Amino acid sequence: MNFEDLIQDVYQKIKEIDDKGETASYIPELAKVDPNNFGVYISTINQFNFGTGNCYDKFSIQSIAKVLALILAYRIVGDDLWKRVGVEPSGTAFNSLVQLEADKGIPRNPFLNAGAIVVSDVLLSNLKNPKEDFIHFVRRISNNTALEYSNRIAQSEKDVGYRNVALGNFIKSFGQIENEPSDVLNFYYDLCSLEMSCKELSELFLFLANNGISIQSNESILSESQSKRINALMQTCGFYDESGEFAFKVGLPGKSGVGGGIIAIHPDQYAIAVWSPKLNKQGNSYKGMKFLEEFTTRSELSIF
Ligand code: GLU
């Protein structure tokens, strides 16, 4: 498969389409990003790497970091994690409070804000210096010491994080958060503020296409069965209330963020990252979704 020609072709085609999305203005700093950025980068397990457009520019990965937090928590507490957070798609918005009342503070899945806040609580209880330990973990598994949080983005989100404050307090009221909600949220904002380029993202996530083993260092980051479960969760819950549609049109496990980034994994083949800041109505990158739909349709490689 000549991924280079295919990516160039699809990139040029999607670049020209009318972008009907909007940048995520509810976090003020995200609204300042140039909406015309568009980058793509692929890393394969055969060590082919290729990118185009703004693939080396860093952006706010937002919810994509929820996968990294989940991976670290899963490594530390193992299957006990599923007592604190479910593995079902929710059918509700990423920041919804609705189901938590009936579910007594157990979020439906770790990629909802509620779920990621509980995962953050687990990390806070288990790490000595959560903020430092988390970034060291991400740097180590990616073999990339250049990865950083953005204090500017974290502060911007904190300034307007009313719904997240509500979620944290609501879950705490059910006794499902151990630490002070404000400490948990500060850590949650930090992890959402991580910045990466498409190149960095696809290189970092490639181990999920390789049964949990890092291609770069040969380190086992997750067991084969854990890696399968993370991919299953990304497949069923990775795209907010559009996860079914993403499975239908693209057919890969993946995760998006409100910064306009998407990471998608083809097990045993590749990881691909796309970034375009304008989001569709469900909160996924408008052009990113279109790119991946066209790319997977034309490459005719499928996990189904
Ligand atoms: N930090 C964002 C929030 O809590 C994450 C949302 C996202 O990317 O889905 O609203």
Image (cartoon, rainbow, N blue to C red):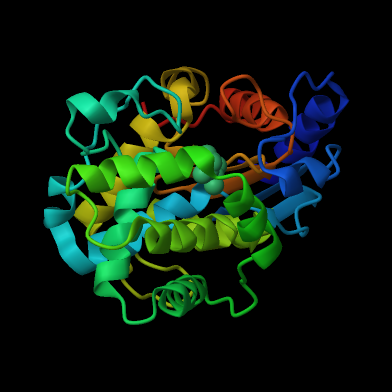
Residue ID at (37%, 32%): 237
Is residue 110 something one can see in this rendering?
A: no
Quadrant in which the C terminus is drawn: top left
Please say if 96 is above or below 261: above
Please say if 244 is above or below 184: above
Residue ID at (39%, 45%): 267
Quadrant in which the N terminus is drawn: top right
Query: Where in the figure is residue 30, as x and y percent of width and height?
Result: 73, 45
Judge from the rendering whether residue 267 lies leftward or rightward of residue 8; answer left or right: left
Query: Where in the figure is residue 181, as x and y percent of width and height?
Result: 35, 56
Is residue 258 something one can see in this rendering?
A: yes
User: In terms of depth relative to the viewer, which is nearer, 150 or 16?
Assistant: 150
Judge from the rendering whether residue 12 lies leftward or rightward of residue 103; answer left or right: right
Q: Quadrant of residue 88?
A: top left
Query: Where in the figure is residue 197, as x and y percent of width and height?
Result: 69, 58
Query: Where in the figure is residue 21, as x and y percent of width and height?
Result: 74, 23
User: In terms of depth relative to the viewer, which is nearer, 17 or 23?
Assistant: 23
Residue ID at (17%, 49%): 175
